[in-house]
Amino acid sequence: MRTTPSRFNESRHLRPGPMRSPLVFLALGLIGGWLLATTSAQIRSMVSGGPAPRAVTPRPGLTDAELADIRIFRETHESVVYIRAIAVQRGYFSMEEVEGTGSGFVWDTDGHIVTNFHVIKDARTADIVLSDGTTWPARLVG
């Protein structure tokens, strides 16, 4: 019985032909040269100070709307408050305290604070931090 060697049993080792190695080295050399050229150009531009600075033209005066915004800010910025709310939330294994934050503003001379509902929703406690850094405990009134 004569057996013919199967194509699948043949052991073929790919060896670079006489032209394959020089082509690989040529490709690597071209890529390396390109990288060197582009990075050296970038380094030269950084060392030389980069592009020349552009002339700065003075801005015209503020518009009436901008002046009104500035006036409103100066008159009201001290009434803005920071709100820190602590809520209890069910975690995977236990109950966890979660801190939420938001802002609001002083509504009247009695010290009522107005804020969005989502800031205090589910809060167990909340603190109000005034613009001067003073902190007060909050109490929900409405």
Image (cartoon, rainbow, N blue to C red):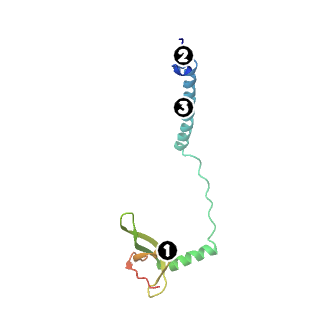
Name the mark on residue 32. 3
> What residue did someone put label 2 on?
5
Q: In terms of sequence position, does the residue under pointer 2 or pointer 1 come before the other?
A: 2
- Residue most toward the top? 1
Give the residue at x 62% y 65%: 59
Q: Residue at x 51, y 79 (%)?
A: 76
**Disc 1 element:** helix
The location of residue 19, given as percent across then percent down, is 58, 19
Q: Which is more toward the observer, 88 or 64?
A: 88
Going by the numbered disc 3, the residue's amino acid type is Gly
In front: label 2 or label 3: 2
Q: CA distance from mark 2 to mark 3?
A: 45 Å
Q: Amino acid at mark 1?
A: His
**Badge 1 local density, few (<14 within 10 Å), some, or many (20+)?**
few
Mark 2 Cα shell of 10 Å, populated few (<14), some (14-19), many (≥20) = few
Q: Which residue is mark 1?
A: 118
Which of the two labelled residues, at mark 2 and mark 3, occupies the earlier sequence position?
Answer: 2
Check the image and report above or below for 4 versus 135.
above
